[in-house]
Image: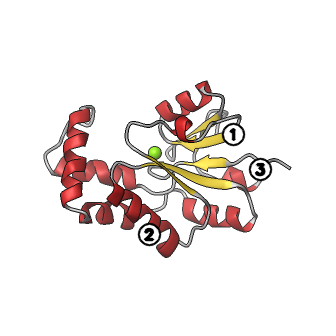
Amino acid sequence: MTTDYTFIDFDGVILDSEERMLERKYDLGFHNHKDESEFDAYFEYTNLHPEEWEYIIKEAKAINNSVEIIKELENLKKKIAILTKIHTLQEMKVKTELLRENLKILCPLIFVPPSVKKYQIIVPNNQLLIDDSKKNIKSWIEHGGKGLIFDSKIESDTNEKVRSLEFLIKR
Ligand SMILES: [Mg+2]
């Protein structure tokens, strides 16, 4: 029996909230998604307009059946946890409400605050992370974990990338 968890990213893996956030940011006039200071300004704006996160997260759609697959993994008693970056406390609150109350997902939720890396919150120690950020996967592996890049647009899974969470059911 393994005590290892599989860690699953939220934005861009479970729900299409990442794209929605970027669209929202763009619409407010913050057009350069490579400029960190634009994100700071946008997240400051969301602190004054808490409904931004409601819109971004609560109306987001599941990617390649991720929500149904996570429920199935829970039924199968697989050791999974959601490991997700948050930019504001309001975002954390809305994500928690959505997962627990709306989607009825019950696995552990681990939030990573701004300026902190996922591998700092969870010591990777050979455990698997599935994340749509190449950067996150690279640093997770560098710190001793196993990682797969989630890319919903590829045709089929490879050694490095998966298009859905389905492979976890048979794992
Ligand atoms: Mg992500």
The reply to whether discs 2 and 3 touch (Cβ–Cβ < 8 Å) is no
Q: Say what amino acid the circle numbered 2 marks.
A: Glu
N-terminal of the pair, mark 2 or mark 1, is 2
Secondary structure type for disc 3 = loop
Question: Does residue 153 lie above or below 147 as drawn?
Answer: below
N-terminal of the pair, mark 1 or mark 3, is 1
Asked whether 37 or 147 is in front, the reply is: 37
The picture quadrant where one finds residue 147 is: top right
34 displayed left or right of 106:
left
- Cα–Cα gap, marks 2 and 1: 27 Å
**Which colouring convention does the figure follow?**
secondary structure
Q: Position of residue 43 (x, y in %)?
A: 25, 49
Which residue lies under the disc numbered 1? Answer: 127
Asked whether 163 or 90 is in front, the reply is: 90
Q: Say what amino acid the circle numbered 3 marks.
A: Arg
Q: Say what amino acid the circle numbered 1 marks.
A: Gln
Which residue lies under the disc numbered 2? Answer: 97
Which numbered tag is attached to residue 171? Answer: 3
125 displayed left or right of 42:
right
Q: Which residue appears at 37% of the width and 62% of the height?
A: 57
- Cα–Cα gap, marks 1 and 3: 13 Å
Q: Which residue appears at 72% of the width and 68% of the height?
A: 75
Secondary structure type for disc 1 = loop
The answer to whether residue 60 of the structure is visible from this angle is: no
Q: Position of residue 129 (x, y in %)?
A: 61, 41
Asked whether 159 or 153 is in front, the reply is: 159
The reply to whether discs 2 and 1 touch (Cβ–Cβ < 8 Å) is no
Tell me if the residue at label 2 has its CB under 8 Å from ligand 1.
Answer: no
